[in-house]
Image (tube, grey):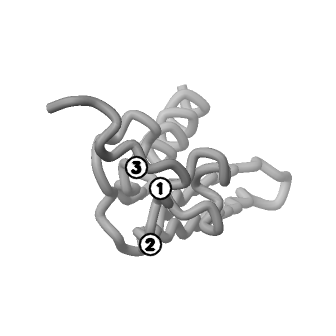
Amino acid sequence: MRSFYLWLWLCILVCLSSSSKAVDCTTDTIGLCTPGVTETIIETVTETVEHKPDGVLTTTETIKDITTTTVTNENSGDLLDGDNDYVVSSKEGDMDQDWGGAWPS
């Protein structure tokens, strides 16, 4: 029965580990993501109890996993400029051909 309570205590400690919500900027996001810095902290606490001939040894181990995510929205400048690496030079919008006046109005 005692080992059941120790196991239950361990499960409760793991369930109570803290974490913060990260920025949701997945591939299905429409528009720009909100710029900012998000820190995700996952803390895991493990407690081990050993019964020894001369007493009980309780060991507590705390592990923190910290992840920092930075979201920025950079200015892309002229999207149709071939030098910005968004479009190839054959598709850039610099009016290589003038179609003005080619058809009657």
Question: Which residue bears the numbered disc 3?
Answer: 25
- Residue 9 visible in this rendered orientation of the protein: yes
Q: Which residue is mark 2?
A: 77
The amino acid at mark 3 is Cys
Looking at the rendered image, the disc whose residue lies closer to the viewer, 1 or 3, is 1
Q: Measuring 40% from the left and 49% from the top, which residue is drawn there?
A: 25
Compared with 29, 33 (above or below) is: below
Which mark is on residue 32?
none
Q: Nearer the viewer, residue 90 or 48?
A: 90
Residue at image point 51% right, 48% down: 97
**Disc 1 element:** loop
Asked if residue 90 lies left or right of residue 12, the reply is right
Q: Quadrant of the C terminus?
A: top left
Q: Earlier in the sequence, mark 2 or mark 1?
A: 2
Task: Tell me the residue at 42%/57% (across/down).
Answer: 19
> Which of pointers 2 and 3 indicates the residue nearer the eye?
2
Q: Is residue 21 above or below residue 99?
A: below
The amino acid type, in three-letter code, at marker 1 is Met
Residue under label 1: 95
Tell me whether circle 2 and circle 3 mark residues in contact (CB < 8 Å).
no
User: Around disc 2, counting alpha carbons within 10 Å, would you say few (fewer than 14), some (14 to 19), or many (20 or more)?
Assistant: few
From the top left corner, tell me how far across and down residue 96 is, in percent. Answer: 55, 54
Question: How busy is the neighbourhood of tag 3: few (under 14 within 10 Å), some, or many (20 plus)?
Answer: some
Please identify the quarter of the rendering in which residue 3 is found: top right
Q: Secondary structure at mark 2?
A: loop
Label located before the other in sequence (2 or 3):
3
